[in-house]
Amino acid sequence: MTVLSPFVYWAQSENNVFIKVDLKDVKEPLVVLEKRKLQLKTKGSGAQGFKDYEFFIDFHSEVDDSKNGLKVTDHKIDLTLTKSQKGWWPRLTSQPQKPVWLKVDFDRWQSEDDLIDEDVRDVREDYPDLYDKLQKEEIGYRKEDFKKVYLTLYNLFMYVGFMYIVCILCIRYMRDGTDFFAVTYKTVGPAMCFMQMLQFLEVLHPLFNYVKGGVIMPLLQICGRFFVLFLMLEHEPRIQKMPVVFYLFLAWSAIEIIRYPYYMSQLYKKENGLLTWLRYSAWMVLYPVGFMCEAVIVFRNLIFVEHSGKWSLSMPNPLNFTFHFATVLRIYLLFVMIPAMYTLMSHMYKARKQKLDTKISFNKFKKS
């Protein structure tokens, strides 16, 4: 048989704990109080109607089981317990998981017990941020913001995905050597395509105020990867078998298995000197390698397209229009790829100067 629990509201002062049980028409409740435990059984009218109700609390700290005040009215049960040691509890229960039936009694959080020498002492003087926190959490039981939970899961999933690609690339290369180059795209290409499609969410995160920062930098990087991956590689099997694909995927993934753990550490404000240094230093090697690999892939596609006329339209045709895809690739190499590389690397250089002041970064590295 399921045991029904009433709604229980609690508050505290430095000396007492106040518990209010939201039950009506209660007669002779059974209360068992110990130093670290409270159990109450009774019959009354609650959320489920007039039935038997029961709850059990394992206190965070000890109370004086010889001193307690019990008051039963037509609408509630009030318990006043005396703390064994004066002070503020971070939460009511010993466990960090809050029962669904336990709430904070905000109306009683500041009580007459906060009077000292007949002058009212506002608890906010000792705990200036307490009431701001109460608006966002119930004491001791932090409610994680949806955005924080989402970003944690997103960054963790992306880290696991790119780490999977790195592990496959390294293990297969150690086993098969250069023979693996010919099947690199076939082996991890679908996984890389999936991860890159998910990365488009990073363009939306700033728009929805999930993260700080602009849209331009992630958009440049993601669009560049989309162009190379879905237009240059996906539709040209001859390039898929070239060694450059292996080095491109390794460079892309190596950046990401550093970037996503760094984002998670910043999300929870856990600074790690080594991780921060890698985040703002590894790009100096990996970005140029990635850009060179992308340029090689686009240039080889340019040669293939020039000879085959793929995705080009010549005159005469019903549309009376000429389109030369090889020219588009030349324009992309000269006027899109090079400026984009300069913009991204300049952005990372400025971010590195701001984040890694030589003296500060050295101290953080030593502490970590």
Image (spheres, grey):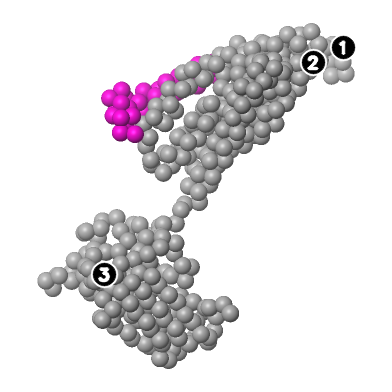
On the image, the x and y values in percent for residue 1 come to: 58, 79
Q: Are marks 1 and 2 in contact (CB under 8 Å)?
A: no
Q: CA distance from mark 3 to mark 2?
A: 78 Å
Determine contact: label 1, label 3, CB under 8 Å.
Answer: no
The tag earlier along the polypeptide, 1 or 3, is 3
Q: Secondary structure at mark 2?
A: loop
Among the 4 quarters of the image, the one containing residue 298: top right
Circle nearer the N terminus (3, 2): 3
Label 3 crowd bin: few (<14), some (14–19), many (20+), radius 10 Å: many
* In the image, residue 97 above or below residue 154: below
User: Which of label 1 and label 3 is nearer to you?
Assistant: 3
Residue 263 visible in the picture: yes
Q: Secondary structure at mark 3?
A: loop
C-beta proximity under 8 Å, tags 3 and 2? no
Indicate yes or no whether the magenta region holds residue 360. yes
Q: Which residue is mark 1?
A: 316
Q: Mark 3 — residue?
A: 13
Compared to residue 288, the image places residue 155 above or below, namely below
Q: Residue beneath label 2, please?
A: 310
